[in-house]
Amino acid sequence: MQWEPNYCESNSGSSERKAKPVELEYVSDIKIYPNPTNNTITIELPTCDNCQTKYIIYDLSGRKVLENKITNSKNIISVSELSAGTYFIKVIDSNKTTTQKLIITD
């Protein structure tokens, strides 16, 4: 579940910022392997007809380090330029998303 800001007025007339949940469908049928890896990863989608999918890799501080579109049901992605460490990979397809930990080794 993700959170989206929502503004509302209190009885005193001042506006408050409150968060409300936004439901997203989390996709578990996306495969990302091998993990850990040192050179490439493969992202497999169950279907990819007219894909509107992308992936984003973040470091542990939340900085985006790699992003690209996915155009096939099986995609091989080079991660050789990333330093060894722990990352998060997010795969987004319209209103579907999945995030997994990704470990890069030497």
Image (cartoon, helix red, strand yellow):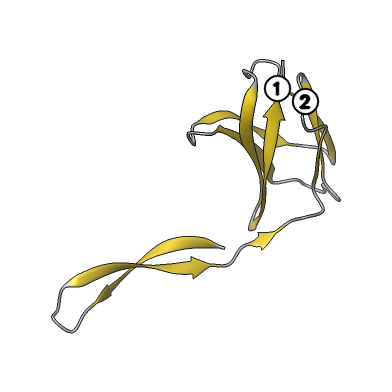
Camera-side residue of 46 and 64 = 64
Classify residue 8 as left or right of residue 57.
left
Q: Residue at x 65, y 15 (%)?
A: 81
Q: Nearer the viewer, mark 2 or mark 1?
A: 2
Position of the N terminus by quadrant = bottom right
Give the image location of residue 77, x and y in percent.
76, 26
Amino acid carrying label 1: it is Val
Residue 31 in which image quadrant: top right
- Say which residue label 2 marks: 37
Camera-side residue of 54 and 35 = 35
Contact check, label 2 and label 1, Cβ < 8 Å = yes
Q: In the rendered view, tell whether residue 106 sits above or below residue 90.
A: above
Amino acid carrying label 2: it is Thr
- Say which residue label 1 marks: 79
In the current view of this chain or complex, which residue is farthest to the left?
Answer: 12
Q: In the rendered view, tell whether residue 61 sits above or below residue 12.
A: above
Label 1 CA crowd tier, 10 Å (few <14, some 14–19, many 20+): some
Position of the C terminus by quadrant = top right
- Helix, strand, or loop for circle 2? loop
Total tally of numbered discs in the picture: 2
Q: Residue at x 77, y 29 (%)?
A: 36
Give the image location of residue 96, x and y in percent.
67, 56
